[in-house]
DNA sequence: CTACATGCAAAGGGTTTGCACGGGG
DNA sequence: CCCCGTGCAAACCCTTTGCATGTAG
């Protein structure tokens, strides 16, 4: 996996509807702006920053402030996840067809490799229990070199 | 464990010496300022931010810039570790008598519970191998409620 | 004596906030 | 119609950088 994945059109539409439902249920208003952002964010193929989203929505003249405010709502609605990697700003990912997982981040080219964290998480739950800690969310990350960059380093090639 | 631990005097002295050695070996200068910062950072009982350190060194009139520059050196020397938790600035911890571990962070009171990540890490190494990823560093974190706060929430007490 | 380390202030990136205007319910 | 949502700009926090001065080697 290369940090990008596809989202089926019907799933996307369904998720946007779920967001509308979430908004109404909480007394927030359903606006074009919010739906535009939701559609882009939920359908985004891979990890994205607030600025990435802003770039693809430039045409509508949406401000960063609104991007952030809406990402916040999408996160509350459990439709996107916020990830933070050491020394970078926040990154987001759509939850669509995309269960929670861990990330390997290549120090050289920035590629994100995802992996299933099922077994690891089981262990973590056990450990949390032992420490009398109620686990709500986990972050499992690895930093190092992806296959391509390991080869490149050996050959002495320049960084991308 | 409550996120604080003690460092024996002799170990601290030894670590400061190791830092001096590191500096000389790399052609950096050994200055009072660097040694003051190293001593505080290496002996700090728990996790700390750059500002925390700056606070305890106010008396010497050390600037934030120098704090950051020196923390960088201490990290290069493998004497402290930098950790980042979602939505906060960088936190550091001394490596003294304190091997690498995972963190549970209480969402309510901010308490950090540490746990041995031995088994979890083994799993991660295996997974990284399967993905042809060369693992150099891992981040294993959990967010949720510590025992005290779980009780407090049940009782409806205010947040600290 | 020379180059590196330091304090200061200013810049920088990413994110949040205050305000007046515009659009949804 | 009223209030929430929005864009704009400014504020904000944490961190890094440029520069003139101080100091270790």
Image (spheres, coloured by chain):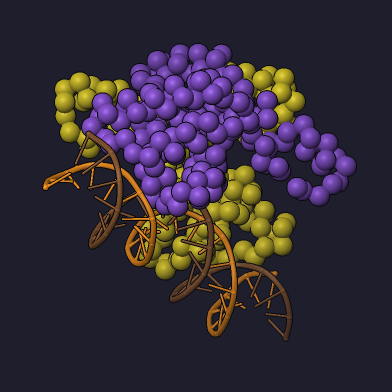
Chain colours: A purple, B yellow, C brown, D orange
The answer to whether residue B153 shows anywhere in this view is: yes
Q: Residue at the spot x=16%, y=29% of the render?
A: B157
The structure residue drawn at horizontal position 66% and vertical position 20%, both measured from the top left corner, is B127
Above or below residue A3? Residue B59 is below
Residue occupying the point 42% across, 68% down: B61
C17 relative to B113 in the view: left or right: left
Q: Quadrant of residue A48?
A: top right
What residue is drawn where x is 42% and y is 58%? Answer: B54
Note whether A10 is above or below B2 in the view shown: above
Residue B96, can we see it? no
- Residue B134, given in percent of the width and then of the height, sits at 72, 31
Locate the C terminus of chain B and report the quarter of the image it occupies. top left
Give the total number of marks visible in the rendering.
0
Which part of the image, by quadrant, shows the N terminus of chain B? top left
Percent x, y for residue C11? 52, 69
Judge from the rendering whether residue D3 lies leftward or rightward of residue A154; answer left or right. left
Pick the front one: D20 or A151: A151
Above or below residue B72? Residue A3 is above
Instruction: Tell me where residue B36 appears, x and y as whole percent.
Output: 49, 59
* x, y percent for residue B63: 46, 66
Residue nearer the viewer, D1 or A43? D1
In this rendered view, identify the residue nearer to me: B5 or A130. Answer: A130
């Amino acid at each position: 996996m290369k940090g990008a994945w596809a989202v089926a059109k019907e799933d996307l539409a369904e998720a946007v509807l779920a967001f509308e439902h979430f908004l109404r249920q909480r007394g927030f208003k359903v606006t074009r702006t919010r739906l535009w952002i939701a559609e882009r964010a939920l359908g985004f193929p891979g990890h994205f920053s607030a600025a990435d989203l802003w770039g693809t929505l430039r045409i509508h003249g949406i401000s960063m402030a609104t991007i952030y405010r809406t990402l916040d709502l999408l996160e509350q609605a459990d439709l996107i996840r916020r990830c933070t990697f050491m020394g970078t700003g926040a990154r987001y990912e759509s939850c669509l067809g995309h269960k929670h997982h861990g990330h390997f981040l290549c120090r050289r080219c920035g590629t994100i490799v995802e992996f299933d964290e099922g077994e690891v998480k089981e262990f973590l739950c056990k450990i949390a229990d032992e420490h009398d800690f109620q686990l709500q969310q986990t972050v499992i990350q690895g930093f190092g070199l992806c296959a391509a960059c390991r080869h490149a380093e050996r050959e002495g090639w320049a960084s991308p």
